[in-house]
Image (cartoon, rainbow, N blue to C red):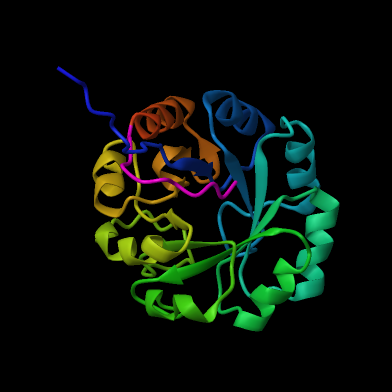
Amino acid sequence: MIKQKDDTVKQTPQIKICGITRVSDAISCAKLGADALGFVFYPKSPRYVTCDTAREISSALPEKIKTVGVFVDETFSSIMQTVEKCGLSAVQLHGNETPQFVADCRKESLIVIKALFLEKSPRIEEVNNYEASAFIVEYGKGTLPGGNALSWDWEKAKAVGENYPLILAGGLSPENISTAISLCSPDAVDISSGVESSYGIKDIAKAESFIRIVSGCMLTKITRRIF
């Protein structure tokens, strides 16, 4: 009997661990297999880091690990200064940045990630307005622009991923990540509070569990490499 060739391409989502505040956590997450690490430069966040701290962490990481600065309605010049000082690979725009602002950041040879939300502006439906490298989609409820640990209907983000590189975020944990990935088929996943022992302090056992589970989630699509 002739065995038919299986042409289905299976890949796993990339992994971004956000809200990194310590060198030790960053190195541990990198060794476990994270593709990207995020630094929050939003002063009202409990995971806020200074440029000096982010630069120290970045300099301790392998070159293959992408470093992402998370900004909320910052000025272009401020973001670019932080990018240069900290040696960032990417910027994540998590506020109400305009399509032109996103386009201007793209001109700087950076990975530019634009946040879209289910429950607030800019909404998922506005995805066509932006020319970002990728989109991070989350719930949009809670006191902070992100990192509120609120689970939501992840399947509602799937349409974005059908046409654009998609990062899924919001309420993810080692316990629910398999379900979230099966519902959404994202190109990457982003977690912060779901692998923490306290704000900005990563629980490495949880991070290891999360990364292991994601690495075992095989998607029947060609995932876009964002990081």
Q: Is residue 118 visible?
A: yes
Horizontally, residue 68 falls left or right of residue 63, namely left
| Magenta-colored stretch includes residue 153 | no
Q: Quadrant of the N terminus?
A: top left
Coordinates of residue 211 in the picture (x, y in percent)? 43, 31
Please identify the dominant SS of the magenta region: loop
Horizontally, residue 166 falls left or right of residue 90, namely left
Q: Is residue 118 above or below residue 60?
A: below
Measuring 63% from the left and 42% from the top, which residue is drawn there? 21
- State the residue lying farthest toward the left: 1
Magenta segment range?
Answer: 217-227
Coordinates of residue 50 in the picture (x, y in percent)? 74, 53
Q: Is residue 152 visible?
A: no
Q: Quadrant of residue 133?
A: bottom right
Coordinates of residue 100 in the picture (x, y in percent)? 66, 82
| Nearer the observer, 219 or 111 | 219
Measuring 32% from the left and 57% from the top, which residue is drawn there? 150
| Nearer the observer, 185 or 197 | 185
Horizontally, residue 151 falls left or right of residue 35, namely left
Measuring 66% from the left and 43% from the top, which residue is drawn there? 66
| Magenta-colored stretch includes residue 218 | yes
